[in-house]
Image (tube, grey):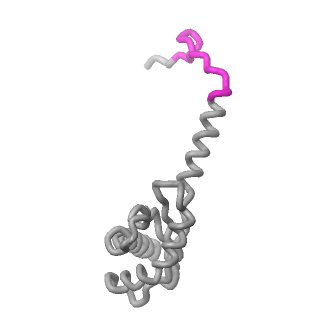
Amino acid sequence: MPRFRMGRINSQLQREISLILSREVRDEKLAEVIVTSVECSKDLKYAKVYYTTLREEGRAEIAKLLEKVSGYVRSSLGRVLSYRTVPELTFRFDDSEELAREMDRVLDRISAELPPETPVEAEDAPEEPDD
């Protein structure tokens, strides 16, 4: 049961933080931030907010901006949510998409190096028993 509750809380935090960043924060760079997931501690005191951006350039600047507005985002969450405590937010860049692309490139390279498969001929295929 607690996992289900934490999943709901994480989803709600993700949705609300995304809305706050896109609608309330007046920086165009932060409007492009995509919140991919949120991991909140069981006591709701801390939350790791994972994000990504569509652009590769300016990540360090976006990280600094997110750190700067984290207090505002937290206070906005306090007005929207009905939690007893609002978690302290820590923003972390989500590099899972980049890792997946790199893995795809490695797999493509490996498959290009493998010899092509020879098709199985009908004579070599095992026969199915008759019923």
Could you say which is closer to the camera, residue 93 or residue 83?
93
Residue located farthest toward the top when viewing the structure as drawn: 123
Question: Does the image show residue 6?
Answer: yes
Could you say which is closer to the camera, residue 59 or residue 79?
59
Location of residue 124 (image quadrant):
top right
Residue at 57%, 16% (x, y): give it: 119
Q: Is residue 38 above or below residue 129?
A: below
Question: Does the image show residue 8?
Answer: no
Q: Which residues are magenta?
A: 112-127
In the rendered image, residue 57, in percent from the top left (x then y), is placed at 53, 56
Main secondary-structure element of the magenta-colored stretch = loop
The verdict on residue 67 being magenta is no
In the rendered image, residue 2, in percent from the top left (x then y), is placed at 45, 76
Q: Is 20 placed left or right of 71 in the picture? A: left
Q: Is residue 117 above or below residue 2?
A: above
Residue at 53%, 67% (x, y): give it: 61
In the rendered image, residue 86, in percent from the top left (x then y), is placed at 43, 85
Could you say which is closer to the camera, residue 34 or residue 69?
69
